[in-house]
Each structure stands twice: as structure tokens, then as C-alpha cells.
Image (spheres, grey):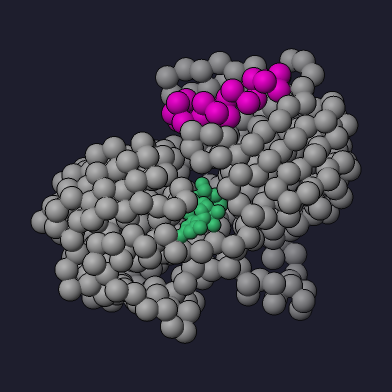
């Protein structure tokens, strides 16, 4: 087992370069299946969710060649296996994108129900609604989802809830469906736009991605392409908050400032100084942090994937702050761990009330999911004393060498291995991604 050991109290200063976006990459890699020719994908983050996606593609018969640290050539023309087994699928939440890609290419797919989730209920009814709308039949048995279609035909899809995954899957399944598909109440996150741009670079005809109405005119075939994944909005936001929490001064490079607007505005309200450039952003603090209220909503609102991180920052702001989780049922499980570090937070359903005291104390804590782990790292960097964070496999699913990037900025953080106790082995078998 590995853990992070952090000696807190050091200001982060210098420059950091953001990697490709996890939530774009885990949709774009399965989308390569739709191509009739090899594709080159660049700016792919080195994270375990990507490794699992590449492994699934190889197990299906795709040829994957490493071209460089973050670039891959993927040849999907010999895929002969349309099933993603439980053993692999449960490790990564986004395995369900193989449903849309396989259905869109082969009119069939068999993928395990995605893994358990630490964020409350995560149904896939909207994904199934989209597949049915264009002509697919589905059956659920023994934890597997089976999709079959004689033919895929464009249709109208109105999502009952704004869903990133269902919007992505609808585009994957409909890009080659005959005729016009209209998706309404679509998610608008930057990674939605990135997948649409990728599919269009292969010859797809998708319009309106980034708005709540997406129109897709089905095409006969999709050709190969070379495509670079967008920078990770949430990794960038995480480093912005780490800089603020340590009262540092950091230039964050390889970002798209427009994708960070809601984070930037909220941080400025808290008293953080921010200067934007074409593809970088400078974050520094030279005064007290100010209490505020935050509510997470789908894009362009404040991202739910930044909620644990901003809540941690607000424990360092004097006064009472309110954080409301507007997307997930249970996204405050990290609060118990912050309490161990001296945070004064009370949670009632989807609302957390934070009595900022301006300081945190180092303690042994555990990451319960990807962004909770990132928040605990931020807390450890800002705390006085030593913080040890266990279950960091959650963090390594979605952040590309976070500890190395933090060390470059002056953090005292080390990854340490320690023997896995018997009780932990059961825990480790339940690893699921978010
Ligand atoms: C994606 O999850 C992200 N994961 C999540 O990021 C992110 O929190 C979430 O979008 C919201 O932005 C990936 O992209 C791999 P949703 P997803 O479908 O697609 C309900 C991270 O930290 N819903 O947008 O699973 C659902 O219960 C992870 O990187 C249905 O009711 O999220 C939730 O309340 C955590 N039926 C809401 O919609 C459905 O069929 C939003 O979920 C689908 C979703």
C-alpha cells in the first residue's frame, strides 16, 4: 500500500504544467473504436483510469502503440471482442463509455454495470434512455448490460437530468446513426465539447456541443485523426486552490482560462489574486482569506469536482462559509477526515457549514474518493505538522503525478509504501473509480 506523507506549512511557489483532462480522455479513448482507421491521441494524462481504458481497448483487439509520454497510436480495425468484463469495468467508473462506442460502431455491446460509487446513487437510466431512443434494446442480467440494435436511427432525446456521462454516451451511439439526433437538456462541460470536437475531427457532424441542445447528423464512416485532449480544468482548479491554501504564488500553465471562469470568480471573492494569460493563470495570496458561500451545479456553474477542494480552503478563511452540493447525494464523506485535522464543519444533507478558524493540524487521514483525496492533500499542505494520507490509489486515478508536481512547487510531500494489513486487503478489493 502507498501513502502520501506531507510536512505542511510551506508556501507553493513557481510554475506547474497541467496534464490532459481525465474526464475527456476516458471518453475519447473508447471513441476511437468508432474510427475505420488508426488514430493518434495526444496530451493524454498518465493516470490509472487511462491505463484501464487502454487495457480494455487492447483486450478487445485494438493495437495500442505508445508514441511518447502522453501520446498513443490506436488502431481499432481488428477489434473482435464486444464485451467489457466485470473484473475490468468495475475498476473504472467511465467504462460505460464503451457501451456507446461499441453500439455506435457494431450495433452491439456487453459491458458490466459500472462500479460502486462513493458519491451516492449513480444510476444509468438516462444512458439507457438515449440508447433506446435510437433503436437499441437492452437487457440487464448478472451485473452486465447487453445492448443490441438491428439499426440505429436518429431520434429526439430529452434528458430528465443534466448528465455528463449520458450526454457523452448519446453522442458516441448516435454519431453514425442514420438521420438527425437531437439531444436536449445536454450537459455543457468542456469535456463534452472535447469529445464532440474529436468525433468531428474524424468526420462526424455534431453541432451545438457546449449548449443544452446538441444536433447530430449520422455519417456513414469515421476516418482516422490526430487529436490532443484539452487541459484538465479540475486539475488546474485543484492547483489554484493549493496555491491559495498555502498563501503561495504559482503560475499554472497549459490551461484554458475560460474553462476556469467559475473557479476564478469564486477564488477572487475569497480574496485570492488571479492574473489570466492566453494559456496560463497566476494565483497568489497577499492578504486574509474571506468566508463565502458556494453551490455546485453543472457547467458553467461551480464544478462539483471542485467541492471538496474549495471546502478545504474555506476552513482557512475566518468566519462562517456555506457549501451546498448541487449534483451528488453524498459528497461530504471527506468531512470526517478534515475534522481529524481540526476543521469545524457540520453537514446536514447537501449543505456543509464551515466555521473557518484559519488553521489546520496534521493528522493521519484516508482518501475516500478522487477529489476527497485531492482536498486532503491541500489540507496537509496548509496544515501545521505531518499529515499521512492513505488510500491514495483514488488520487492516482485522476491526477498525473500530483506529488511530483507539488514537490516542484516546494511542497514537502513523499509517497511512502507500507505493508498492507489483512483487513485492508478486503478494502482494496472494493476499489472503484468515480
Ligand atoms: C461525470 O460523472 C464525472 N465522471 C464526475 O467526475 C462528475 O462529478 C460528474 O460527471 C458531474 O460533472 C467522469 O466524467 C468519468 P452525471 P457522471 O451523469 O457522468 C444523475 C471526478 O471526480 N444521473 O453528470 O457519472 C446522477 O446521479 C468524477 O472526476 C441520473 O440520474 O455524472 C447525478 O446526480 C466524480 N441518471 C447527476 O445525474 C443517469 O443515467 C449527474 O451525474 C446519469 C446520471
* Residue occupying the point 43% across, 83% down: 141
Q: Is residue 26 left or right of residue 154?
A: right
Residue 399 position (above or below residue 106): above
Q: What is the span of residues highlighted in magenta in the rendered image?
A: 252-272
Q: Is residue 333 a member of the stretch shown in magenta?
A: no
Specify the quadrant that holds the N terminus.
Answer: bottom right
Residue 324 position (above or below residue 431): above
Residue 426 position (above or below residue 164): below
Residue 424 position (above or below residue 373): below
* Residue occupying the point 44% across, 74% down: 112
Q: Is residue 202 left or right of residue 239?
A: left
Instruction: Give percent across and percent down for residue 159.
Output: 40, 52
Q: Is residue 261 a member of the stretch shown in magenta?
A: yes
Instruction: Give percent across and percent down for residue 336.
Output: 81, 53
Q: Is residue 276 left or right of residue 391?
A: left
* Quadrant assignment, res 20: top left
* Quadrant assignment, res 297: top right
Instruction: Give percent across and percent down for residue 11.
Output: 74, 27
Amino acid at each position: 500500500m502507498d501513502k502520501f506523507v506531507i510536512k505542511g506549512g510551506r508556501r507553493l511557489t513557481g510554475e506547474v504544467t497541467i496534464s490532459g483532462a481525465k474526464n475527456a480522455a476516458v471518453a475519447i479513448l473508447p471513441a476511437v473504436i468508432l474510427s475505420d482507421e488508426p488514430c493518434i491521441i495526444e496530451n493524454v494524462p498518465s493516470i490509472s483510469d487511462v491505463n484501464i481504458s487502454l487495457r480494455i481497448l487492447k483486450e478487445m483487439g485494438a493495437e495500442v502503440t505508445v508514441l511518447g509520454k502522453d501520446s498513443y497510436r490506436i488502431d481499432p480495425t481488428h477489434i473482435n471482442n464486444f464485451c467489457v468484463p466485470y473484473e475490468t469495468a468495475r475498476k473504472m467508473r467511465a467504462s460505460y463509455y464503451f457501451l456507446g462506442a461499441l453500439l455506435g460502431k457494431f450495433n452491439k455491446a456487453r459491458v458490466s454495470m459500472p462500479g460502486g460509487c462513493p458519491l451516492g446513487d449513480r444510476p444509468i437510466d438516462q444512458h439507457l434512455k438515449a440508447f433506446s431512443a435510437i433503436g437499441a434494446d437492452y437487457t440487464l442480467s448478472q451485473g452486465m448490460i447487453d445492448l443490441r440494435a438491428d439499426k440505429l436511427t436518429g431520434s429526439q432525446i430529452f434528458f430528465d437530468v443534466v448528465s455528463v456521462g449520458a450526454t457523452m454516451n448519446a453522442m458516441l451511439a448516435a454519431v453514425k446513426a442514420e438521420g438527425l439526433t437531437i439531444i436536449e437538456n445536454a450537459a455543457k462541460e468542456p469535456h463534452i465539447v472535447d469529445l464532440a470536437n474529436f468525433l468531428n475531427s474524424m468526420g462526424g457532424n455534431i453541432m451545438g456541443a457546449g449548449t443544452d441542445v446538441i444536433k447530430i447528423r449520422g455519417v456513414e464512416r469515421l476516418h482516422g485523426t490526430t487529436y490532443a485532449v484539452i487541459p484538465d480544468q479540475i486539475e488546474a482548479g485543484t492547483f489554484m486552490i493549493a496555491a491559495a491554501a498555502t498563501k503561495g504564488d504559482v503560475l499554472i500553465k497549459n490551461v484554458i482560462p475560460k474553462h476556469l471562469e467559475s473557479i476564478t470568480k469564486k477564488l477572487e471573492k475569497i480574496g485570492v489574486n488571479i492574473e489570466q494569460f492566453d494559456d496560463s493563470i497566476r494565483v497568489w495570496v497577499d492578504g486574509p482569506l474571506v468566508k463565502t458561500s458556494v453551490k455546485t451545479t453543472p457547467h458553467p456553474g461551480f464544478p462539483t469536482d471542485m467541492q471538496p477542494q474549495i471546502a478545504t480552503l474555506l476552513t482557512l478563511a475566518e468566519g462562517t462559509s456555506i457549501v451546498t452540493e448541487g449534483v451528488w447525494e453524498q459528497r461530504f464523506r471527506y468531512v470526517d477526515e478534515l475534522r481529524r485535522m481540526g476543521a469545524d464543519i457540520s453537514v446536514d444533507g447537501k449543505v456543509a457549514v464551515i466555521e473557518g478558524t484559519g488553521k489546520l493540524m496534521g493528522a493521519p487521514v484516508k482518501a475516500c474518493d478522487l477529489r476527497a483525496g485531492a482536498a486532503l492533500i491541500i489540507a496537509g499542505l496548509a496544515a501545521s505538522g505531518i499529515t499521512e494520507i492513505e488510500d491514495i490509489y483514488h488520487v492516482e486515478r485522476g491526477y498525473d503525478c500530483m506529488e511530483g508536481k507539488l514537490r516542484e512547487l516546494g511542497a514537502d510531500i513523499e509517497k511512502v509504501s507500507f505493508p498492507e494489513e489483512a483487513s485492508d486487503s478486503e478494502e482494496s478489493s472494493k476499489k472503484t473509480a468515480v
